[in-house]
Structures are given as C-alpha cells and as structure tokens.
Amino acid sequence: MLQTRRSEDPVVDALVKGNFDEIIDDDVKIARMLELAPYGAEADVSGEGAVAFVDGLRGAKISISSSTSGFLVRASDVATLTAHFERRRDHWPRCAWRCTRSRRESTR
C-alpha cells in the first residue's frame, strides 16, 4: 500500500506500470542540464581559507555560489575542477574541500 497527497505523481505512475525508464530519462536530462554528477563536477569549499581560495578561482571556467558551509564550486567535468584547484594548492592547508563526482566523493 502506498499513500500520497498528490493525485498525479510520476513515481507512483511508474510503480503502477512497472516502468521506470521515463523517470530515469527525466533524471538524466536534468542532471546533464545542471551538470550534476556524473555529468559534471562540484566541490564544497569551507574553512578559514575558503574565501581566499575561492577568490583565486574567480574568472575561471567554473561557477561559484555560496553554500551553508562555505562555497559550492562547479565545473563541467572533474578534470577542469581539479586543474583549477591544483593552481590554488597554496591555500589547501587553510581550507577543506569535498569533490563529488560520478556518484562518489573524494575528500581533501
């Protein structure tokens, strides 16, 4: 038994039909559009040196936004994100970052 307040729900429809292809296809389209893992790379940057670290990334082919813990840094792929982070290696001891990619997490 499943109870929901929504009269039409794509997940419930998929359960009833036993076909999840449409939901998966929609999720993949959204993930690609938003460059979410595994179709993009993102890192959460926090700590005492986060502001200086992120300021040095501005202007690169990445996007930077505020997050609850510091900053969310995103790039189209892991290689691009990693290359920009390597250039800021001098700031690593003063900040922490966690990179999410391909549904796995790497912590520095």
Image: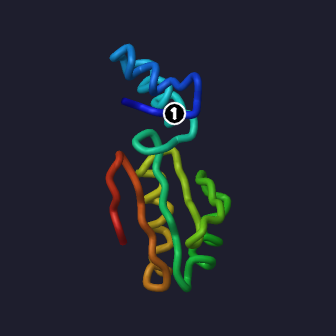
48 versus 3 height, above or below: below
Please give left or right for residue 71 compared with residue 15 in the image.
right
Residue denoted by label 1: 4
Q: Quadrant of the C terminus?
A: bottom left
Please give left or right for residue 19 compared with residue 55 in the image.
left
Image point (49%, 55%), residue name: 42
| Label 1 crowd bin: few (<14), some (14–19), many (20+), radius 10 Å | few
- Residue 102 placement (x, y as % from top left): 35, 46
Instruction: Inspect the image, locate mark 1, and give the three-letter code of the amino acid beneath it.
Output: Thr
Please give left or right for residue 58 compared with residue 84 in the image.
right
Tell me where residue 55 sits by quadrant: bottom right
- Residue 97 placement (x, y as % from top left): 45, 70
- Residue 91 placement (x, y as % from top left): 50, 80
64 versus 54 height, above or below: above
Image point (47%, 65%), residue name: 85
24 versus 37 height, above or below: above
Image point (53%, 75%), residue name: 46
The count of marks equals: 1
